[in-house]
Amino acid sequence: MNPLLLEIPTKIDTKRLYLRIPMAGEGETVNASIRASINELKLWLPLYQSMPEITETEITVRRAHNQFLNRESLRFFIFSKETDEFIGTCSLHNINWDIPKFEIGYWIDIRFSGKGFMTEAIQRLTHFAIQELNGRRIEIRCESSNMKSRTIPEKLGFELEGILRNEDFSADGKKLIDTCIYAKIN
């Protein structure tokens, strides 16, 4: 089946959160979270080695919206049901619809870290990928030294399939790093 014909919801609920497709006009909100979290984000994400302008973030938001509609990448913004505050993002990307397989990516506004929000969001996104998209393989890749990120797949029962040594560059591009590959197979 052509993935463009898949009916993929634009909103998914969890107990405390809702995951929703990015919408035009949300660049300022996302940019504020990036600003609050930039010191943490730049440790792990090449995209955030410097603080983006609001217009750059708005372009990223609009691209994510278009990629969702084209079924190239399924990014969701994470919001608190209680307060409607933006918490972070999670996505299914590097998609191979033929298998189907997905890689999960995520980042959280540091002000919401340590409350189990991201684990809750990723648990729901994993369930969605397996149950509703018939995902056969769900991967989470992260730098081996990123213990906060590694905790999520470990809590959710993903299997550490291996650590690729000297596989990529650090977010700042200055050294080689090891990449952990976690997976769930259906």
Image (tube, helix red, strand yellow):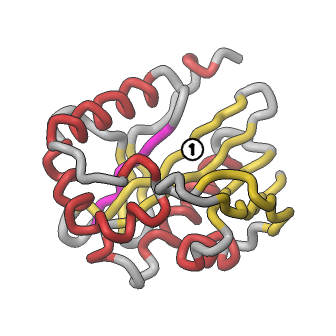
Magenta span covers which residues? 74-80
Q: Quadrant of the N terminus?
A: top right
Q: Residue at x 46, y 69 (%)?
A: 118
Q: Is residue 72 above or below residue 133?
A: above
Q: Residue at x 23, y 46 (%)?
A: 52
Q: Residue at x 71, y 60 (%)?
A: 179
Q: How many numbered marks have been drawn onto this rendered protein structure?
A: 1
User: Viewer-proximal residue, 97 or 150?
Assistant: 150
Is 34 a magenta residue? no
- Give x and y (percent) for residue 104: 60, 51
Residue 94: quarter of image: top right
- Give x and y (percent) for residue 10: 40, 39
Q: Main secondary structure of the magenta part?
A: strand
User: Viewer-proximal residue, 13 or 20?
Assistant: 20
- Give x and y (percent) for residue 122: 55, 62
User: Viewer-proximal residue, 160 or 179?
Assistant: 179
Q: Mark 1: give few (<14), some (14-19) or many (20+) Cα within 10 Å.
A: many
Q: Residue at x 65, y 47 (%)?
A: 103
- Give x and y (percent) for residue 166: 75, 58
Please, which residue is most extreme toward the bottom here?
114
Q: Is residue 130 above or below residue 80?
A: above
Please, which residue is most extreme toward the front here?
174
Relative horizontal placement of residue 99, taking residue 74 as reference (left or right): right
Relative horizontal placement of residue 69, taking residue 80 as reference (left or right): right
Instruction: List the residue tagged with mark 1.
Output: 92
